[in-house]
């Protein structure tokens, strides 16, 4: 059994990550990734999240099975597969500060405008599904930040009901996370320690997700959109912080 001073915070993080994603359809990585990285080595924290993430999406999909539409994610996933190796190229060639900073500024600006009640007129966010999937795959393999392009695509469809938006996010994130899980497994990145942490964390993750789903059922469409853009804003701020931290490290 792990020491309680390490086990209890990790169980709390798992519960909170499930709660956020059960409520919104995304955001578990936003909560869990930076917190787990404070407690566990990266080569433990990252594979652990790849084991947990598909299960959150599965819980959401079971709840939203009537709203699932595979046509909405086909081109996104095709782009994701193509973009994943591109991300490995970016990792060695493109400055991370520029990529993360630019994405952070865009997410923050888009969310702030949307939270005022205006819908930014960006047709490409609605229509360029393959390109957005490609960017998602590239950002995911390069910087572990695959969610924002697809989240913005879904948020740019206010005509979709919240169940349709949440189901689309859960389906894409679940399948893309499954691709990552298989890749990590083939690379033999799952140690016995990681599997043990998964077994400890999963019950709290599932409980948090279920509570999040119950809270979601009490939300109206307006509340769900405000929650979505608030989380997008938090993602943007986190990416800007990552970019600034990298700049500060380079100057030390």
Image: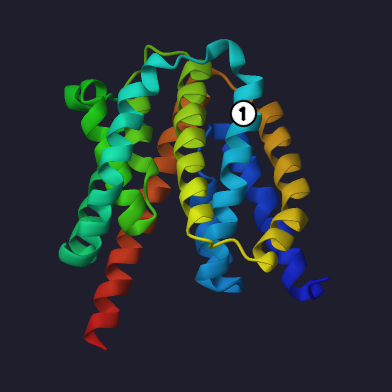
- Asked whether the viewer can see residue 175, the reply is yes
Residue 36: quadrant of the picture: bottom right
On the image, the x and y values in percent for residue 93 come to 16, 64
Q: Position of residue 121 (x, y in %)?
A: 19, 23
Which residue is at 61% across, 28% downward? 60
Total numbered labels: 1
For the point 56% across and 64% down, the residue is 45
Numbered disc 1: secondary structure: helix
Where is residue 90, by image quadrant?
bottom left
Quadrant for the C terminus in the image:
bottom left
Residue at 54% over, 51% down? 50
Residue extending farthest to the right is 1
Q: Position of residue 16 (x, y in %)?
A: 65, 49
Instruction: Pick the quarter of the image with the N terminus.
Output: bottom right
Percent from the top left, x then y, of residue 230? 44, 40
Which of the two residues, 195 or 204, is positioned nearer the viewer here?
Answer: 195
Q: Nearer the viewer, residue 42 or 126?
A: 42
Q: Is residue 206 above or below residue 216?
A: below
Q: Residue at x 81, y 72 (%)?
A: 4
In the displayed structure image, the side of residue 161 where residue 192 appears, left or right: right
Check disc 1: other Cα within 10 Å, few if <14, some if 14-19, many if 20+.
Answer: many
Q: Which residue is mark 1?
A: 60
Residue situated in front as seen by the camera: 111 or 192: 192
Whether residue 217 is visible to the viewer of this picture, yes or no, is no
**Does residue 236 sit above or below 96 in this rendering?**
above
């Amino acid at each position: 059994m792990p020491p309680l001073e390490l086990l209890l915070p990790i169980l709390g993080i798992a519960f909170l990550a499930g709660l956020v994603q059960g409520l919104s359809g995304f955001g578990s990585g936003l909560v869990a990734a930076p917190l787990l990285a404070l407690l566990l080595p990266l080569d433990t924290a990252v594979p652990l999240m790849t084991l947990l993430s598909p299960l959150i999406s599965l819980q959401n999909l079971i709840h939203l099975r009537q709203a699932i539409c595979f046509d909405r994610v086909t081109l996104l996933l095709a782009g994701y597969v193509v973009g994943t190796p591109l991300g490995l190229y970016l990792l060695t060639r493109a400055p991370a500060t520029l990529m993360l900073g630019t994405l952070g500024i865009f997410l923050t600006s888009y969310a702030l405008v949307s939270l005022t009640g205006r819908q930014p007129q960006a047709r490409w966010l609605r229509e360029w599904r393959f390109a957005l999937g490609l960017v998602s795959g590239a950002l995911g393999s390069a910087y572990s930040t695959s969610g924002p392009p697809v989240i913005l695509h879904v948020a740019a469809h206010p005509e979709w009901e919240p169940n349709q938006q949440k189901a689309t996010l859960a389906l894409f994130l679940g399948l893309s996370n499954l691709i990552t899980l298989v890749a990590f497994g083939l690379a033999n990145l799952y140690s016995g320690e990681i599997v043990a942490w998964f077994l400890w964390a999963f019950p709290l993750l599932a409980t948090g997700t279920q509570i999040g789903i119950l809270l979601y059922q009490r939300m109206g469409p307006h509340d769900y959109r405000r929650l979505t853009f608030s989380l997008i804003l938090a993602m943007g701020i986190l990416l800007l912080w990552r970019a600034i931290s990298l700049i500060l490290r380079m100057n030390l």
